[in-house]
Every structure is written in C-alpha cells, then in structure tokens.
Image (tube, rainbow, N blue to C red):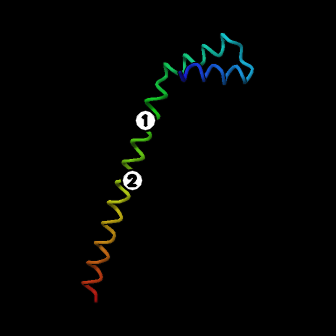
Amino acid sequence: MKTVETIRSLRGARFDQDQAEAIAQAIENSGLESLTKEVANQGRDLAVLKWMVGFNMAMTLAILWKVFS
C-alpha cells in the first residue's frame, strides 16, 4: 500500500513510471519502516531515562536538604 503511495508521490514529482517503481522498491528494500520503529523505541527509552534522572535529582536534593538544614 505504501509502495503505491510512494510511486504516486514520485510521479507527481515528475519521475517517469520506471524510475518511480525503482525508487519505491529501493525504499522498501532498505528497511526504512524498521528504522522508523527503532527510532520510536529509542524515544520511549529516552522518556524512561528522563524520568529516572528526574527522580534521582529529586532524591539527591531531598538528602542534601536534610543534611544541611
């Protein structure tokens, strides 16, 4: 389905049919979809790391507050 959409987009950009099909096939074979999924997974991992750093900072500040007050 995405291949057909890609071919239509390329045809709209003035590629001829053979060129559009070759480019769409190359994109499909390149694993671009798996790369997109992997980037999305990295984003989720980054969100967890941000939460962990925030929690660690809050606990450190609480301990420092307790020690020096």
Q: Is residue 22 above or below residue 64?
A: above
Q: Whole-percent x and y of residue 40?
A: 43, 41
| Furthest residue toward top | 18
Quarter assignment of residue 22: top right
Give the residue type that dot 1 points to: Lys
| Furthest residue toward right | 14
Pointer 2: what residue?
Answer: 47
Q: Is residue 11 left or right of residue 65?
A: right
Q: Whole-percent x and y of residue 34?
A: 43, 29
Q: Whole-percent x and y of residue 58?
A: 32, 71
Numbered disc 1: secondary structure: helix
How far apart are the alpha carbons under marks 2 and 1?
A: 16 Å
Give the residue type that dot 2 points to: Ala
Numbered disc 2: secondary structure: helix
Q: Whole-percent x and y of residue 38?
A: 41, 36
Pointer 1: what residue?
Answer: 37
Q: Earlier in the sequence, mark 2 or mark 1?
A: 1
| Furthest residue toward bottom | 69
